[in-house]
Image: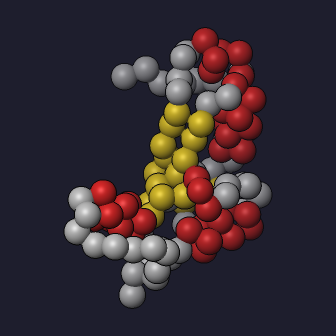
Amino acid sequence: MNMIPTTDAGSLRQASIGALLFDMDGVIYRGDTLIPEVPAFLAALDAAGVMWSMATNNATKTQLDYVQKLAGMGIDAPESRIVTSAIATASYLRHLSLIHISEPTRPY
């Protein structure tokens, strides 16, 4: 596996990376503490035109909850870039046509 050891946008463009998906807890932050290298890395991804999203297996919080948590750490991540396990499950079930969900709802 190749690691991306840079925050240089030019190097990221040369790596031909189309998109990245990050787990949040332990990769973007630990508990309520932002991992220091994350802002520069996300800025480099944006500058290189690399799409990124964040995922969590915690279904007790909404996308908006995570947007607010990240904003409190100085990370601007819109709801569209946050994937929770509840959202992923609803999307999968919708894809299978097993249920009809018109709007995301709280998982509890």
Q: Nearer the viewer, residue 15 or 98?
A: 98
Model colouring: secondary structure
On screen, residue 19 versus residue 87, left or right, reads right
- Residue 88, given in percent of the width and then of the height, sits at 38, 60
Q: Residue furthest top?
A: 14
Q: Residue at x 32, y 63 (%)?
A: 94
Q: Quadrant of residue 78?
A: bottom right
Q: Residue at x 59, y 36 (%)?
A: 51
Is 70 placed above or below 50 here? below
- Residue 76, given in percent of the width and then of the height, sits at 73, 55
Q: Quadrant of residue 5?
A: top right
- Residue 106, given in percent of the width and then of the height, sits at 46, 82
Q: Can you see residue 97?
A: yes
Q: Residue at x 72, y 44 (%)?
A: 39
Quadrant occupied by the C terminus: bottom left
Is 90 placed above or below 16 here? below
